[in-house]
Image (cartoon, rainbow, N blue to C red):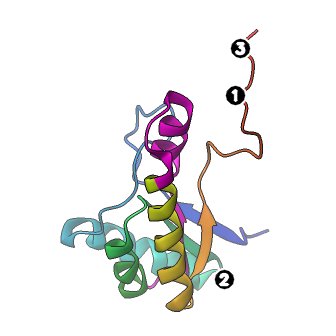
Amino acid sequence: MRPEQCTLVPDAPDAFTSDRGWDLDEAQMKLVRPAIKSLKEIGCRTILFIDPDPVIVSKIADSGADGSETYTGSYAAAFRNGGDYRALLEKCSETARIAQNLRLAVNAGHDLNLSRKLPSTA
């Protein structure tokens, strides 16, 4: 059985959870392009994990990936801590709109829920 989708995330080996997305600079493109090629050869849709940054989206198309997953941790932290989460949500939305216009798949990252209340820590 082959995976239907694979999301590539630039985590350090000792990372507890994802805390940032790909920059997709030249060095990172040298890493992701061969991985994307290998995954596509087995019929797997490939997604790149990115920060909410509209500039990075066009680089996804250049990498050969099928779409993006936007890291939402900074948004979730701002929401939880009373920061300017609306501005971060707008960056996430703008990033998604640009990806859709480029006909890329759009996924949102973790740390999201439908409740305006924080979960209890009891």
Circle 3 residue: 121
Secondary structure under the numbered disc 2 in the rendered image: loop
Q: CA distance from mark 2 to mark 3?
A: 42 Å
Horizontal side of residue 97 vs 20, given as left or right = right
Q: Amino acid at mark 3?
A: Thr
| Between discs 2 and 1, the one toward the N terminus | 2
Q: Residue furthest left?
A: 26
Task: Examine the image and state in which quarter residue 122 appears.
Answer: top right
Vertically, is 61 above or below 5?
below
Q: Amino acid at mark 1?
A: Leu
Q: Which residues are the magenta region?
A: 64-86
Numbered label attached to residue 118 = 1
Residue 69 is a magenta residue: yes
Q: Judge the density around disc 2: few (<14), some (14-19), many (≥20) Cα neighbours within 10 Å.
A: few
Q: Judge the density around disc 3: few (<14), some (14-19), many (≥20) Cα neighbours within 10 Å.
A: few
Q: CA distance from mark 1 to mark 3?
A: 9 Å
Secondary structure under the numbered disc 1 in the rendered image: loop
Determine contact: label 2, label 3, CB under 8 Å.
no
Residue situated in front as seen by the camera: 75 or 14: 75
| Between discs 2 and 3, the one toward the N terminus | 2
Q: Amino acid at mark 2?
A: Gly
Residue 19 is a magenta residue: no
In this rendering, which labeled residue sits more in front, label 2 or label 3? 3
Secondary structure under the numbered disc 3 in the rendered image: loop
